Amino acid sequence: MINPETIIALATPPGIGAISIIRISGKNAVSISEKLFFSRKKKKISDLKSHTVHLGKIKDGKNVIDEVLLTVFKTPHSYTGEDTIEISCHGSSYIQQEIIDLYIQNGARVANPGEFTLRAFLNGKMDLNQAEAVADLISSENEGAHRLAIQQMKKGFSSDLKELRKELLDFVSLIELELDFSEEDVEFADRKKFNSLIKKIKSELKLLIDSFKSGNVLKNGISVAIVGKPNSGKSSLMNALAKDDKAIVSDIPGTTRDSIENSININGVKFRFIDTAGLRETDDIIETKGIEKTQEQISKANILIYLFDINDIDELEIKKTVADFNRKDLTLMLVRNKIDLKTKKPELLKNIRKMNIIEISALDVSSVEIIKDKLISNINIINTHTNTVVSNSRHLNALKNALSSLINVEIGIDNNLSTDLLSIDIRKCIDSIGEITGEVTNDDILGNIFANFCIGK
């Protein structure tokens, strides 16, 4: 399955910069480079030690394209496990393309998205979970996502799954061996140990499945919808949180007609804030559409900030809001805005303070820090220094399939199902776990995974 062709790609972002890095990998990476690279010390690349850097020129015949640094990584001690060359050239788009074209003319081809990492997986340099973590690391936009990707690259939970899969495979082999001796009525597999193993694996799978919510939060961010009546200060709060005037602020009710989104990093966690259209009865068709979108955003949000002005609300309305928006998987934060203005309803204010409501002025950036502190305290994220965090939807589906198969095995045992039928579900569980680590795979799975990578990685 390993492609013997030599591949090349730009490993740094396209465009003009100080330097660019071009990566070449494959069995002819060294021999092609020897035709094109001329070392200042006049040494052949095949004679150079691995993990060394050399100054020289890339030439097309007598024509010098650029003076470059060439780094040598020899098999098997490279990222891909193959002979790999990296060329650091000047960051001209013209120079980049000239070098790539020159290599193609001499037998290389342009790499497909993620092909370098695919080769690393196929050559046993990393398992599939680690390979997918490479893409997550490249796309990480906050400390939490970065930390999670680094953990998965260190094997994360995949080493534990491999061990559990091996134990299950050993047992199913013994169970299937019994089928060959069915007439002798012998048991090779200890049923007590088998039941204990199933319970152990079930517990581990459930832990990983439950961790997905936290892992997904770290990877993709937490959705926070800011809702309230028109002129409650939603857009001002959004701007204060983001320290940016992205949302238009006006005294005219209904100014915000559509959702405005802004991502903010708070203590290493990404929050996706959505400023929504004000909630009210209206005959305006466009504003009504905006309110419908608000309801849609509320249904998707992880956290809801309900913002209100003390002078434009009553206690019954607040309680009704809590009842209307309440959802098992939603964190609701009640925030009273405009504390800098004179309060016309002191009695209502006294009752509201008993309801654990946050009080701010959206125009005061320092008071908005209270909101940030509350957001961090409200999120329940599993400690990412452990290896039990799943953030990949493909992994989640495989884990659910594995758990479902184990549950079927338990039901089969309770109903005295025959050994050959039990082994079918055990094998399904083994295959589902193997799909995560890459011990069970096919071209379709690999194609889908690596198609999302950038070219050059």
Image (cartoon, rainbow, N blue to C red):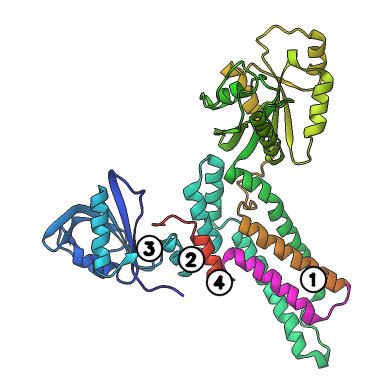
Instruction: Give the residues drawn in magenta, as a range.
Output: 415-440
Q: Main secondary structure of the magenta part?
A: helix
Label 4 close to label 3 by CB (< 8 Å): no
Q: Which residue, given by chain and number where applicable, does mark 1 sit on?
A: 409
How far separated are the C-alphas under marks 1 and 4? 25 Å
User: Is residue 195 at least partly visible in the picture?
Assistant: no
Is label 3 in a helix, a strand or a loop?
A: loop
Please name whichever residue, 295 or 139, is drawn nearer the observer in this view of the structure: 295
Q: Which amino acid type corresponds to the residue marked 3 in the rendered image?
A: Ala
How far separated are the C-alphas under marks 3 and 2? 15 Å
Among numbered discs 4 and 3, the one appearing first in the sequence: 3
Q: Which amino acid type corresponds to the residue marked 4 in the rendered image?
A: Asn
How far across and down, in percent of the image, does residue 192 sit? 82, 72
Name the mark on residue 396. none
Q: Which residue, given by chain and number where applicable, does mark 4 sit on?
A: 442
Determine the residue positioned at 68% across, 61% down.
399
Q: Which residue, given by chain and number where applicable, does mark 2 sit on?
A: 121
Name the mark on residue 111. 3
Mark 3 burial class by Cα count in 10 Å: few <14, some 14-19, many 20+:
many
Label 3 close to label 2 by CB (< 8 Å): no
How far separated are the C-alphas under marks 3 and 1? 44 Å
| Mark nearer the viewer, 3 or 1 | 3
Quadrant of the drawing holding the C terminus: bottom left
Mark 4 burial class by Cα count in 10 Å: few <14, some 14-19, many 20+:
few
Is label 2 in a helix, a strand or a loop?
A: helix
Q: Which amino acid type corresponds to the residue marked 1 in the rendered image?
A: Val
| Mark nearer the viewer, 1 or 4 | 4
Is label 4 in a helix, a strand or a loop?
A: loop
Q: What is the residue that sits farthest to the right in this orientation?
A: 415
